[in-house]
Amino acid sequence: MHPRVYIETSIPSFYHEMMKTDPAIDQIRKTRREISQKYGHDTRALIAHYRSLETKYADRIVKESVAEYSTK
């Protein structure tokens, strides 16, 4: 395993403060951590879980054509 390297960034402090205090984002992050923990932080298991949800809720997923985003 590689050691983690932390690099100080020049992102303004107001950006960090905004990120810390947004309750909706905090809840999303909490839920993502809980789901990851449920699957033992196993990437393959998480992908399988999300693919099963994609299949289960296929009628709710909006799929847009790639051509709609191509530049001309």
Image (spheres, helix red, strand yellow):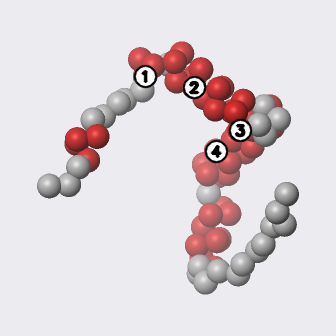
Mark positioned earlier in the residue sequence (2 or 3): 3
Determine which residue is flagged by label 2.
Answer: 51
Q: Is residue 7 left or right of residue 72?
A: right
Mark positioned earlier in the residue sequence (2 or 4): 4
Quadrant in which the C terminus appears: bottom left
Between the residue at mark 1 and the residue at mark 4, the CA separation in whole angstroms equals 20 Å
Instruction: Tell me which corner region of the image, top left, top right, bottom left or bottom right, holds residue 27.
Output: top right
Between the residue at mark 2 and the residue at mark 4, the CA separation in whole angstroms equals 19 Å
Determine which residue is flagged by label 1.
Answer: 60
Using the rendered image of the protein, determine whether residue 23 is visible from the camera's viewpoint. Answer: yes
The mark lying in front, picked from 3 and 4, is 3
Task: Please give the name of the residue rendered at 84% of the width and 66% of the height, measured from the top-left corner.
Answer: 3
Mark positioned earlier in the residue sequence (1 or 4): 4
Looking at the picture, tell me which residue is in the foreground, 68 or 57.
Answer: 68
Kindly identify the amino acid type of the residue bearing the numbered disc 3: Thr
Looking at the picture, tell me which residue is in the foreground, 18 or 33.
Answer: 33
Mark positioned earlier in the residue sequence (3 or 4): 4
Percent across and percent down for residue 61 are: 42, 26
Determine which residue is flagged by label 4.
Answer: 28
Kindly identify the amino acid type of the residue bearing the numbered disc 1: Arg
Q: In the image as oriented, which residue stretches furthest toward the left?
A: 72
Looking at the picture, tell me which residue is in the foreground, 40 or 61.
Answer: 40
The crowd level at tag 2 (other Cα within 10 Å; few <14, some 14-19, many 20+) is few
- Judging from the image, what secondary structure is the residue with disc 2 in? helix
